[in-house]
Amino acid sequence: GQSLEQPSEVTAVEGAIVQINCTYQTSGFYGLSWYQQHDGGAPTFLSYNALDGLEETGRFSSFLSRSDSYGYLLLQELQMKDSASYFCAVRDMGRRALTFGSGTRLQVQP
Amino acid sequence: ETGVTQSPTHLIKTRGQQVTLRCSSQSGHNTVSWYQQALGQGPQFIFQYYREEENGRGNFPPRFSGLQFPNYSSELNVNALELDDSALYLCASSGGTGSAGELFFGEGSRLTVL
């Protein structure tokens, strides 16, 4: 089976940088994804790491280390609208279904 | 391009009843998956359909069943509702040209079981 661990809550101030870590245990997977979900909204895709290393998309970057079973999401130049829950997820081998972590609630303060 | 749409958005049922939730997948996507999200938790995979066949299932009992239609829309049926079934039910589609780890979610159907 798959299991993912991430911090339950993170607080940061506007303009700062925050890193949300994710460690996982899995018998095999294709890659690590990150999703953002605002209260009452749908999860929306942020990034996907199939290979080790850093992927950058605007203010967001994501990192994966398969040897350490570890990844993180880095958010730069935080804005109030970044206040949301962030989920890491692994895609199981053989299908497109995802196993999600329990989520990290990010609170951005002025 | 039309996104993933789900109906109804909210519904209330009583224990023991049955419910059907509906999903229209994003244009060009042939794979639909359903997730259950309890309050404060991550989405939990229920099952996935590809070209009208179930091709993956999570740890949910048989009273959770589904269908996918030729136009790739889908239904989730839950029989003999229990209080713990109260959750947000999310439909996600994939199969287009997006990233391998990318699912497109609908806004969900919030089910309350009394």
Image (cartoon, coloured by chain):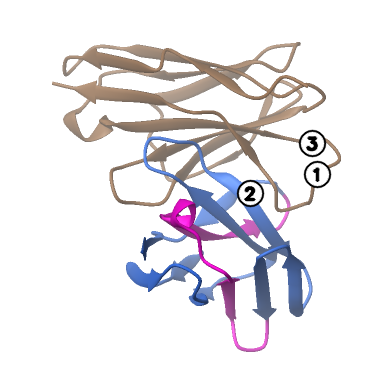
Chain colours: A blue, B brown
Classify mark 3: helix, strand or loop: loop
Q: Nearer the viewer, residue A60 or A3?
A: A60
The residue closer to the viewer here, B85 or B12, is: B12
Q: Residue at x 68, y 12 (%)?
A: B69
Name the residue type under label 3: Gly
Comparing B84 with B42, the one in front is B42
Disc 2 with disc 3 on a shared chain: no
Q: Chain of mark 1?
A: B
Lateral position of residue B103 relative to residue A1, left or right: right
Question: x, y percentage for residue B23?
Answer: 57, 18
Alpha carbon of mark 2 to alpha carbon of mark 3: how far? 15 Å
Let me know if marks 2 and 1 both belong to one chain: no
Residue B97: say if magenta. no
Instruction: Pick out the residue farthest to the left.
Output: B114
In the rendered structure, which amino acid carries the disc numbered 1? Gly
For the residues labelled 1 and 3, the Cα–Cα distance comes to 7 Å
Q: Which residue is mark 3?
A: B95
Chain containing the residue with disc 2? A
Q: Is residue B25 visible?
A: yes
Which residue is denoted by mark 1 in the rendering?
B98
Give the distance between the C-alpha atoms of the residues marked 2 and 1, in whole angstroms: 10 Å
Badge nearest the viewer, 2 or 3: 2
Q: Is residue B24 above or below residue B91?
A: above
Q: Nearer the viewer, residue B104 or A10?
A: A10
Which region of the structure is painted magenta?
A66-94
Q: CB of mark 2 within 8 Å of CB of mark 1?
A: yes
* Image-quadrant location for residue B12: top left
| Label 2 residue SS | strand
Q: Residue at x 28, y 44 (%)?
A: B39
